[in-house]
Image (cartoon, rainbow, N blue to C red):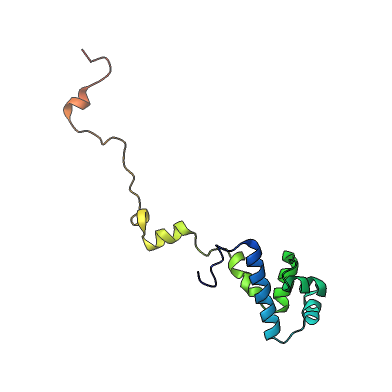
Amino acid sequence: MSEYDLDPLSDQQILAKLAGRLRSERLQRNVTQQALADLAGVGVATLRRFEGGEGNLSLLNLIAVLRALGLVHLLDALIREPDVSPIASLRENGAGIYREAPVRQRARPESSSADDASWSWGDGE
C-alpha cells in the first residue's frame, strides 16, 4: 500500500492523516495554532482538537484552514468539471465503438427483381 492509497483506510484513519498533514503544513510555516485559528476564523480549541485527533472540522472550517495555509487549491480536483465528456473524448480519439462514424442502414434493402415488383395483395393464389 502506498502512502497515498486511502481506500483501505477507515474514515477515522483518513481524518487522522488529514489532521497530521495540516499540522505539518502549519509547523513547516512556523505558524502557531492560535495564529492559524485567527487567520482561518475558527476557534483555537477546535483546531487543537482536530490536530490532536479528538475532533473534526466542518467543511466550512476545513476550507477556511486550507485557505489560511494557502492550500485551498488542493480542492480543485474535487470541484473542477471535466473539460471534455468521456464520450466526446472517445469520439475525438477514435477509440472503441467510436472509431468510425456510425452508418445508417435500411431495415430491408430494396429488391430489383421482377417477381417482387409484380406481387400485390390478393394475388397469393
- x and y percent of residue 95 in the render? 36, 59
Q: Nearer the viewer, residue 33 or 91?
A: 33
Q: Is residue 82 above or below residue 103?
A: below
Q: Is residue 76 left or right of residue 93?
A: right
Q: Quadrant of the C terminus?
A: top left
Q: What residue do we see at 66% from left, 75% from top?
A: 20
Which one is nearer the viewer's eye here, 2 or 120? 2
Image quarter for residue 27? bottom right
Residue drawn where x is 31% and y is 42% of the image: 105
Above or below residue 6? Residue 113 is: above
Number of on-image labels: 0
Q: Position of residue 121 (x, y in %)?
A: 28, 18
Asked where in the image residue 112 lies, by quadrant, the reply is: top left
Counting from the top left corner in percent of width and height, residue 91 is at: 40, 58
In this view, the residue farthest toward the top is 125
Residue 109, image quadrant = top left
Q: Is residue 122 above or below residue 30?
A: above
Q: Provide residue 73's location: percent of width, then percent of height.
A: 63, 74
Is residue 43 in sight in this rendering?
no
Foreground residue, 101 or 1?
A: 1
Residue at point 79% right, 70% down? 46
